[in-house]
Each structure stands twice: as C-alpha cells, then as structure tokens.
Image (cartoon, coloured by chain):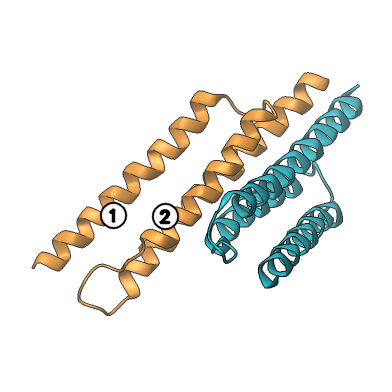
Chain colours: A orange, B cyan
Amino acid sequence: MATETLSGQSEKAYALLKEDAQKILNLIEVQMTNLTMPQCPLYEEVLDTQMFGLSREIDFAIRLNLIREEEGKQLLGQLEQQLSALHEACMREEGK
Amino acid sequence: MATETLSGQSEKAYALLKEDAQKILNLIEVQMTNLTMPQCPLYEEVLDTQMFGLSREIDFAIRLNLIREEEGKQLLGQLEQQLSALHEACMREEGK
C-alpha cells in the first residue's frame, strides 16, 4: 500500500516535470514565431532562467526519491535537444 | 501505512525547501561580506534567479500535495524578509 502510494507520487512527479519541460518549449516556440524582428529573438536570458527553474524542480524530485537521477538527466537532455532543433530551424528561416 | 509514508515525504519536502531557502540566504550573505567594493554588490540578478528556482521547487511541492500553498507562501515570505533585513544592514554599513 505504501509502495503503491509512493509509486503513484513518482508517476505524478515525472508527469509534472514533463509538462513543465513542454511549457518551456512552447514558450520559446511562441517567442520565436511571434517576434516580428528579422533576427532570432535574444531569448537566451528567458531560456536560462526557465532551464534553471526546471533543473531545480528535477533536483528536488531526485532528492525526494521521486525520480531517478538518470531520468532527470534524460528529461533535461531531451528538452535541450528540442530547443536546439528549434533554434536551428529559426536560424535557417532567418538565412533565407 | 500509506498515510505515514506520505506524511514522511511531506516532512522531507518541507525540510529540503527550508534548507534551500537557507542556502540562498547564505549565498547572498557571503556575497555581501566578501566583496571588497565600497558599494553593496549588484546581487539582484543572482537573487532573482535563485528566488525563481526556489519558487519553482515550492510550486512543484504544492502540486504534489507535499506542502500546503500557505506553507509555500510563508517560506518565500520569510526568506524575502530575511534578505531585505540583510540588504538594509548592508546599506547602513555603506552609509558610514
């Protein structure tokens, strides 16, 4: 029973972290799409702060044994890859 | 049993958050004490980022029902008060 409840908490924690990663991706995508400036937005500052916030959440979940360290690294790594793909697409668009 | 385990998690979550708040306070204190510049350090940027990180952790703990919203607000509020007292002490020191 206790194990079940804790594993439920783990699943919820992981789902929340994935949601938060997706929100960061959406935020950056919206920024890139809606800015009318010819160059890519200087989004680094927003991004750094958001990534720092997510990494604090992930670290907190690891310390509570809700997710494994490996899962946390994977979550951050995936998001970094998606953001970098988005950034490259934006740079290509700009180069046209 | 399940309830006990969850309440154990809550206590741990709250203790971790208090620890993290204390770390921010220590970080800012060290910055203020060790900088040899005559004026108070421009610590706002560091502070904003750290406070954002802590508020993400607190929000995450609330969404997992590990702490109550009220407790989260209290934690942030206390830290803000302590930081502001520290800042005032520093300004007085500077004014001498």
Q: Nearer the viewer, residue B53 or A58?
A: B53
Q: Toward which corner of the image does residue B94 lie, by quadrant?
A: bottom right
Indicate the position of residue A68 as horizontal and vertical percent values.
57, 24
Indicate the position of residue B1 as horizontal and vertical percent values.
91, 21
Indicate the position of residue A87 as horizontal and vertical percent values.
26, 56
Q: Which mark is residue A55?
A: none
Mark 2: which secondary structure?
helix
Q: Nearer the viewer, residue B57 or B96?
A: B96
* Residue A1 in sight from this viewpoint: no
The crowd level at tag 2 (other Cα within 10 Å; few <14, some 14-19, many 20+) is some
- Residue at 70% in and 52% down: B59
Q: Chain of mark 2?
A: A
* Residue B57 in sight from this viewpoint: yes
> Could you tell me the amino acid type at mark 2?
Leu
> Seen in the image, is B2 located left or right of residue B92?
right
Q: Nearer the viewer, residue A87 or A23?
A: A87
Q: Is residue B25 above or below residue A72?
A: below
Toward the front, the furthest residue is: B96
> Could you tell me the amino acid type at mark 1?
Leu
For label 1, the residue is A86
Quarter that holds the N terminus of chain A: top right
For label 2, the residue is A25
